[in-house]
Image (tube, rainbow, N blue to C red):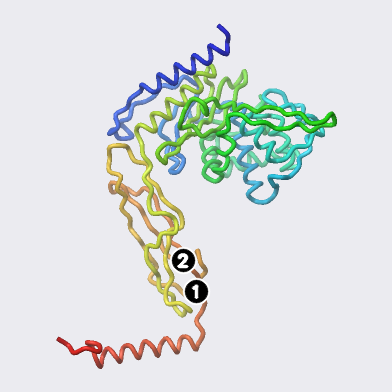
Amino acid sequence: MSLKKTISLTLTAMICFSALLSFPASASADELPKMNVNAKASLLMEPVTGKVLLEHNAHDKLPPASVTKVMTMLLIYEALGQGKIGWNDTVTVSQHAASMGGSQVYLEAMEQQSVTDLVKCVVIASANDAAVAMAEYIAGSEDGFVTMMNARAAELGMSDTNFANSCGLPAPGHVTSAYDIALMTRELILKFPQVFEYAKIWMDKITHKTARGQEDFGLTNTNKLIKTYPAATGLKTGSTNEALYCISATAERNGMQLISVVLGAPDPGTRFGEAIKMMDYGFANYALVPGDAAGTILGSVGVRKGDVENVNAVIKSQVAALVTKGKSTELTKDVKLADAVNAPIRAGAKVGEVIYYHDGAEVGRSDLVAQGGAEKASLKDMIGRSAQRWFVSVTKAENPCGMGACP
């Protein structure tokens, strides 16, 4: 039997086995069964709340192979979002980038590719040469980009991580952990969900553009879950002799996303099967309950000496609670508003806070902000407003029943 066929059968068996797993839907988080994962380290996280649902050796410092590229992808999308680079920019491949081994799309030195096509090569095909080419384009050198990677890791609280390159090829001291991988994956998919546009593509192509002419080159997604697990949305695989088989897998079902990290699995089938097993566990046992949508009006606040008398208080960001299936999905809230604010006030300024509870425990909070702004009222406006209030008060005093007779 060929190695390829053996791996395929192993993966199929893992998927079938995971489908048979059952867990008590009404159990609390503390009562849910522990799960043995056949890998050096693993972790399951719900990204909106950041809650860890399962973990095994989650802070062990291990080589991540090409899962490194989650951070590379995050910095690429941040550079695009900041306007530092553009999707249609042309990148000239350096000799250094073209020299990368391992997973690659065989870019040649001085070959020119668009940012769009290089990003496709990184996300879909896990191409080391494309990752380094993008790193050099953003930072001027791969070393400069690695400095950016480590700085961003520190900002995210990735205390188990040290990057030595942008693609994940073996290098001394190039390590991270299952927990840290979940952190950077969470940042990427929540801030840049458009990454899924490429991560869910099974096959695509680029065109090599060299002095010899143009030639199409096929891209195949390294993440086999895209074809075998209906809920799969991405994201990044990796393997080297040292790291063994790794993945940061993402999936979504019924409005809830999950991140499943596996490091150091013994073979490709086990890597995918264990990631599926953890995600099936999460989907079977948890649900994400959203609070009020961002922009929902939860009251109004008076404006002192403003050109308007009050401003609406709206939710700045939506809160969601992760609840165990079988329990109540009702959220309660406590709205706290300022008594009044002084003009001028800008739209988006904080005017209060809303706190959400589930079963009496706080599950999240959001600022309440002014829906619109208010300028200082002119003296004429203030005199006119005072006169109007005086007139209304006198009218009510003289005729408390209005225009009709009192009963």
| Residue 341, x across and y down, in percent | 44, 72
Q: 351 or 176, which lies in front?
A: 351
The relative height of residue 229 versus residue 11 in the rendered view (above or below) is below
Which SS class for mark 1?
loop
| Residue 165, x across and y down, in percent | 68, 32
The residue sitting at the bottom extreme is 398
Q: Amino acid at mark 1?
A: Ala
Quadrant position of the N terminus in the picture: top right
Count of number-bearing discs: 2
The residue sitting at the right extreme is 211
- What residue is at 30 percent from the left and 31 percent from the top? 31
Circle number at residue 22 = none
Circle number at residue 370 = 2
Crowd band around label 2 with a 10 angstrom C-alpha radius: few (<14), some (14–19), many (20+) = many
Q: Is residue 358 left or right of residue 92?
A: left
The residue sitting at the left extreme is 407
Residue 388 position by quadrant = bottom left
- What residue is at 46 percent from the left and 80 percent from the top? 305
Q: 374 or 221, which lies in front?
A: 221
Q: CA distance from mark 1 to mark 2?
A: 9 Å
- What residue is at 38 percent from the left and 48 percent from the top? 290
Q: Amino acid at mark 2?
A: Ala
Which SS class for mark 2?
strand
Are circles 1 and 2 on residues that touch, CB within 8 Å? yes
Q: Is residue 103 left or right of residue 190?
A: right
Q: 184 or 229, which lies in front?
A: 229
Circle number at residue 374 = 1
Quadrant position of the C terminus in the picture: bottom left
The relative height of residue 272 versus residue 359 in the rendered view (above or below) is above
| Residue 168, x across and y down, in percent | 64, 28
Q: Is residue 285 left or right of residue 186?
A: left
